[in-house]
Image (cartoon, grey):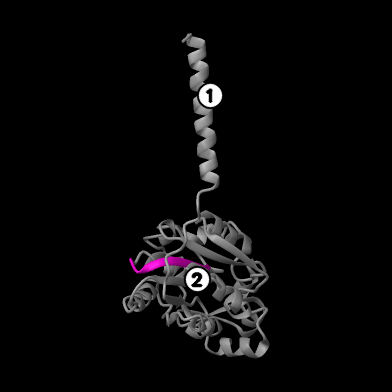
Amino acid sequence: MKPLNKLCLIAASLLMLGTVSAMAAEVAPVIAPVKANNVVLVHGSWADGSSWSEVITRLQAAGLHVTAVQNPLTSVADDVAATQRVLNQQDGPTVLVGHSYAGTVVSEAGGDPKVSSLVYVAARAPDAGEDFVALSAKYPTMPVRAGTEEHDGYVTLKQDAFLKYFAGDVPRDKAMALFAVQQPIAKTLFGERTTAAAWRSKPSWYAVSSLDQTINPDLERFLAKRMGATTIELPSSHLSLVSHSKEIADLILEASGRQP
């Protein structure tokens, strides 16, 4: 064979191989999530486990075993420990879900072998050792910050800020009940850093709240994209788990390997 013809044959073979590889990548099947029977829900700042109540009933109706963690919100380590105690009680694959600040907690605790997938609801999702305060500062400050007040080293939200900026699309009577049970946070909580980022090794889902006035929606979009999460976007306040409980429950069902 002449050298030129041989080179042409090699080039054609490489081109065909590249085309076949590209076609294979296009038709590669999506790996289904591990089927999980357990869901652990972790609440965020200025909330308690009752914020998940409407999601809980929907998940229980679908046959899932559901537990809501009661975070002390005193430190990341304390909240991770509270979450870990609940994870230790699960009997198999478990979907770990975090709202708001609790995205930090599930990113740290999500490396537990029982955790099969992660769901973030309008949540923080720091990388290991990341200065999340500095990352957040790259985006416009949200109005809820003007409504915080400190007492004895703990921070709460004033009523007006809670109703308008935290629970803006929640019916007033429900929002007032949630305001009454808000859990104060240690003033140092948001500045703490994690040592792990479970979303780097676990399949993840993310619900962006496009009307959020607590965490910047563009920051949420950045976090969801960075982790390669399956993402939905809801026209919701920060409390999408309350105002859009069906959509949030459906996302968790998907992460558990079930059809909504």
**Res. 100 visible in picture:** no
Amino acid carrying label 1: it is Ala
Q: Is residue 245 above or below residue 192?
A: below
Task: Find disc 1 in the rendering and name its residue.
Answer: 12
Amino acid carrying label 2: it is Arg
Residue at point 40% right, 73% down? 75
218 with respect to 114 (left or right): right
232 with respect to 226 (left or right): right
x and y percentages locating residue 154 in the rendered image: 47, 80
Residue furthest front as drawn = 1
- Examine the structure image and report whether residue 119 is included in the region drawn in magenta: yes
Q: Which residues are magenta?
A: 113-120
x and y percentages locating residue 191 in the rendered image: 45, 66
Nearest to the observer: residue 50 or residue 168: 50
- Tell me the crowding category of disc 2: few under 14, some 14 to 19, or many 20 or more residues within 10 angstroms, Cα based: some
Please tell me which of labels 1 and 2 falls first in the chain: 1
x and y percentages locating residue 244 in the rendered image: 62, 77
- Under circle 2, the secondary element is loop
Place residue 241 in its image quadrant.
bottom right
**Res. 17 visible in picture:** yes
Quadrant holding the C terminus: bottom right
The overriding secondary structure of the stretch rendered in magenta is strand
Residue at point 33% right, 78% down? 85
Image mark for residue 258: 2
x and y percentages locating residue 185 in the rendered image: 47, 78
Residue at point 51% right, 86% down? 50
74 with respect to 140 (left or right): left
